Structure formats: structure tokens, C-alpha cells
Image: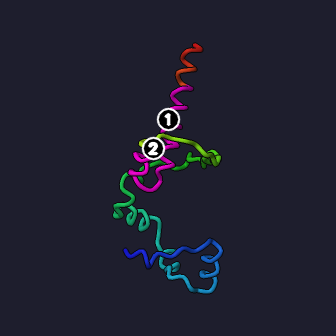
Amino acid sequence: MSKERIVRYSAEDIEKMITNGEDRSDHARVDSKISAEIEQAMFDDPDWAGSIDIDWSSATIVQPPAKKPLSIRLDQDVVDFFQATGKGYQTRINAVLRHYVDQQKILKEKRQK
């Protein structure tokens, strides 16, 4: 898909489009489907593979902790390594640090026992 065709709309923009009949969704077709048809369409969709039999009834919303902007000095080779992994490298650095913190907490709890 060409990046030239990717567009973004705010929730308000979408609401206006729906109200004005400018959206291209076939709401009548979707509304007319019965649950069995929707479920069968999910089974036929490879993007749903492995997710259909999950019991979502006890799912909870998890808010990620707030991020704190920080200036930090890291070794150049460390930064180069993470940047070479592509977009989102700062998130991956955070994940490595998060893992370290979690492991330190586990060790501390074991020592206290």
C-alpha cells in the first residue's frame, strides 16, 4: 500500500463524516449480520487466528505508567545497537530497563525472606 494513500482522522472528524453520510462503511450490511455470521467471518479471517477462543469477559484496562522526559548519557555503541533495531528503539531501551528493575525487585523480595 502506498504511503500517499494513508490518511488520519480524529474521532471528531469520523463522527462528522458518519453524520454527513461521508463514510464508506456499509453500516446496514453489518447491522443485518447475525452473531453466527460475524463469528464465522472471524474464523475465516487469518488476523483473528488464535484470538477467537480467548475469554475476554474478565479483561481489564491497564493504563501504562506515565513517562518522564529525561536527558541521559549512554555509551554510543549501546545507542547505535538500539537505533539499528529500527523505529521504537527508545521503547525497547525502556523495556530492557523495566526488565532489570523487575528482576531487582524479585531478588530483593527473595533476600528479605
Q: Quarter of the image containing the C terminus?
A: top right
Neighbour tally class for label 2: few under 14, some 14-19, many 20 plus, Cα within 10 Å: few
Q: Main secondary structure of the magenta part?
A: helix
Residue 73 percent location from the top left of the image: 55, 42
Is residue 95 shown in magenta?
yes
The one of 104 and 12 positioned closer to us in this rendering:
104
Name the residue tied to disc 1.
99
Q: Position of residue 75 (x, y in %)?
A: 47, 40
Q: Amino acid at mark 2?
A: Gln
Residues in magenta, as a range:
79-105
Camera-nearest label, 1 or 2? 2
Picture layout, residue 64 above or below residue 108: below
107 over 89 or under it: above or below: above
Give above or below for 32 relative to 51: below
In this picture, residue 23 sits left or right of residue 19: left
Check disc 2 and report the residue beneath it.
Answer: 76
- Residue at 49 percent across and 74 percent down: it is 30
Q: Percent position (x, y) of residue 95? A: 50, 42
Tell me, yes or no, whether the highlighted magenta stretch contains residue 18.
no
Disc 1 from disc 2: Cα separation: 21 Å
